Amino acid sequence: MWVAALFGMSSAFVESVLAQLFKEKNNHDFVGGLPFYGRRILGNFRSIGIVLSLAFMVYAFFNVPVQTFNVFSAIGMIVDTATGQTADRQSPLYFAIAIFLVGGCAFLILGGIRRVTAFTNKLVPIMAIVFCGISLAIILINLPLIPAFFSQVIGGAISPDALFGGGIGVALAEGVRRGLMSNEAGQGTITMAAAVADNDHPCEQGFVQSLGVFFDTIVICTMTGFIVVIAHLWMGFDDPALWAEVSASRIATYVSSVQALIPESISAIITIIVSICYALFAFTTLLGMISFAEISATFISRTPQFIIGVRVLGSLVFVPFGALSVLAGLELGNLWAMSDLTNIMMLYINIPILLLGSPLVFKALAHYRATNGGKFISSTIGLETEHWTEEHQRHLPD
């Protein structure tokens, strides 16, 4: 995950600056992202933008069932901890979760992106602070184990078994997959959010997105990784395949690791708090994916009927699909495989475009450094854009 994050910070910067450069105005909001800059970089053919928009929508929608599953898993964990009983997938509890989840998503998504952002802007900072606070507290409680953590991670990576037995390849593949899942750098997802932002210079959003990748993966995932590694839960599994199956549920693995490292007297309350955070993380990610699909869809058409159709497809087709997958007993590993496939698909599409567009980003960065983030006009780097014109930038100081 560290490797994925270090490369992801650079790809996040490039794709976010490109999203800013080629963003467009849609009523009172900005829209942009992969379809918009992809079209301009690949010859300015509208058909290319449509293909990229459809590809991103497929990617976003097929990531929804995984997050739906995560919501169920987290809420199930809360109920299990509070009652001491494990609920069946066909129980009234799971049907109630499905009804409230689909209803809540439909209410927020059909209300538009402004309703979604009003909801997520309040929740995400609180969730992040609580989750990081608990993780940091657990790390401080187990502070003497920090050297052992780095020893196991680094030693395991360069051990003869890892280098010559294929272990390093497996670790890289799994780490990159999970790293991509955590920060989504290079996949085009963050380009939708980057384009929506109102910045004084395109590079400003690039720095913000790079920091986002750093905090997502280098900070938060390292905290989580410390807890999982030090707990040594896999030591009880002789068969690696069995451990892989058990650990497919990320929330169950993390909670079990937390429980192994804290006093039993506070185990239940910490489990419930962490599970609530996890459920809300999954829910807001689910909302974000559908909202980003909507932003991507604006490239194809901005008519109200088409946009409502996209919202309905996300909230009333793919969210129920995820809920039905849980109720039918489908295991999370199957959904992870589907999600990983779409993640890789977007990387193969987006990274070549980023490489082709990187000269424009380098020019924008040179301008930022030369002017200390001063007023930016795209024509100064030989580029004509819809937003970064003299007319739109008149209100900014030189």
Image (spheres, rainbow, N blue to C red):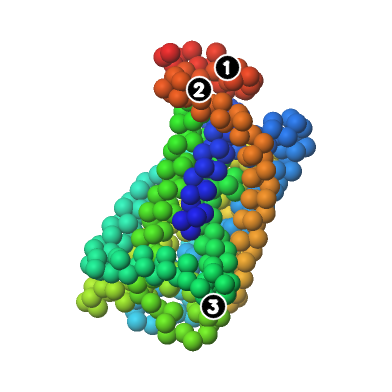
Contact? badges 1 and 3 (CB < 8 Å) = no
In this figure, which residue is indicated by the disc labeled 2?
Answer: 367
- Residue 205 percent across, percent down from the top left: 47, 34
- Residue 284 percent across, percent down from the top left: 46, 53
**How would you rate the neighbour count of disc 1 (Cα within 10 Å): few for under 14, some for 14-19, many for 20 or more?**
few
Foreground residue, 4 or 110? 4
At x 48%, y 58%, the residue is: 1
Q: Quadrant of residue 168?
A: bottom right
Image-based side of 114 in relation to 57, left or right: left
| Residue 46 is at least partly visible in this image | yes
Q: Amino acid at mark 2?
A: His
At x 47%, y 64%, the residue is: 71
**How would you rate the neighbour count of disc 2 (Cα within 10 Å): few for under 14, some for 14-19, many for 20 or more?**
many
Relative to 261, does residue 281 appear above or below in the rendering? above
| Residue 115 is at least partly visible in this image | no
Inter-mark Cα distance, 1 to 2: 9 Å
Q: Amino acid at mark 3?
A: Glu
Foreground residue, 85 or 146? 146
Q: Quadrant of residue 350?
A: top right
In this figure, which residue is indicated by the disc labeled 1?
Answer: 380
Foreground residue, 275 or 261? 261
At x 28%, y 69%, the residue is: 145
N-terminal of the two: label 2 or label 3? 3
